[in-house]
Image: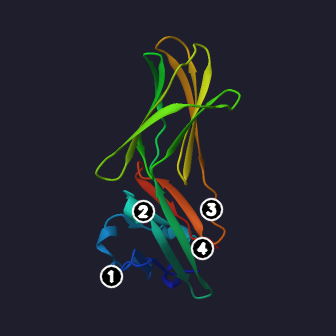
Amino acid sequence: AKLTKVSVTWEKKDLSGLVYKYQNAAPVLGDQNSQFKGRTQLFPDALVTGNASLLLRAVRSTDAGVYTCAISSSTAGGKVNINLRTAAFSAPTFNVLDGNLVATASRWFPKPHVTWLKYDNKVLNGITNFTEDTAGMFSVVSKLQPVNISDTYTCRIENNLVTAVSEATVTGVSGVSENTYFTYSAASSLLASTYLSIMTTVLCIYYLT
């Protein structure tokens, strides 16, 4: 299909104006909602394969919601809903302070839950404090006591979108070696779900065929 025959429109539920429109081989942004100004683009070279991905820059928590992508060409067309859910997450850092193993994570959204586990998956009692900033982001400080040198502890920080699993080994009275990996919630069976970290600057939303 020639690019001049392809039209793509991105809209967001309950939002006036458009998120993005592409028609006649060029962006058509006269009706674009002001909150998306300068933050969106398509990939014209990919349109010929049916890929109407939207690149959304400088993602914000307010970008969460249901988006509709409509694509049409001279031979076919279709529409899909995508539920965009936003999350902020960061790997914790660890240190030993006064016999406590302390995990500190600077940015989480939505508010997470923290669980400490021993190597045998026994749940341990930790003390967790949350601080919310004016943007709704949460910083996490969680303490576990007592801890033993050479023992490994698992710290899980999780909300309904993202889980950070950290293994922290106490190497000395003030030293800790650590490793963190992230897992993400499964997509809804009814709506395609895209997850993002609002600490990053770029998000691609994919048109699903």
- Give the x, y percent position of residue 35: 31, 69
Return the disc, 4 or 2, that comes first in the chain's sequence: 4
- Label 3 sits on residue: 187
Which element type, helix, strand or loop, lies under badge 4? Answer: loop
Mark 1 neighbour class, 10 Å CA radius: few under 14, some 14 to 19, many 20 or more: few
Q: Residue at x 40, y 64 (%)?
A: 63
* Mark closest to the chain's N terminus, 4 or 3: 4
- Under mark 4, the amino acid is Gly
The one of 25 and 208 positioned closer to us in this rendering: 208
Q: As rendered, which of 126 and 16 lies closer to the eye?
A: 126
The furthest residue to the bottom:
74
User: Image point 60% across, 26% down: which residue?
Assistant: 153
In space, the residues marked 2 and 3 are separated at their CA atoms by 20 Å
Which residue is rendered at x = 40% and y = 74% of the image?
19
- Give the spatial CA distance, label 1 vs label 2: 17 Å
Q: Which residue is mark 1?
A: 31
Q: Quadrant of residue 32?
A: bottom left
Looking at marks 1 and 4 on the same chain, the residue that comes earlier in the sequence is marked by 1
Element type at marker 3?
loop
Reading the image, the residue beneath label 4 is 50
- Tally of marks: 4
| Image: 27 above or below 184 | below
Q: Is residue 152 visible?
A: yes
Asked if marks 1 and 4 touch (Cβ < 8 Å), the reply is: no
Residue carrying label 2:
56
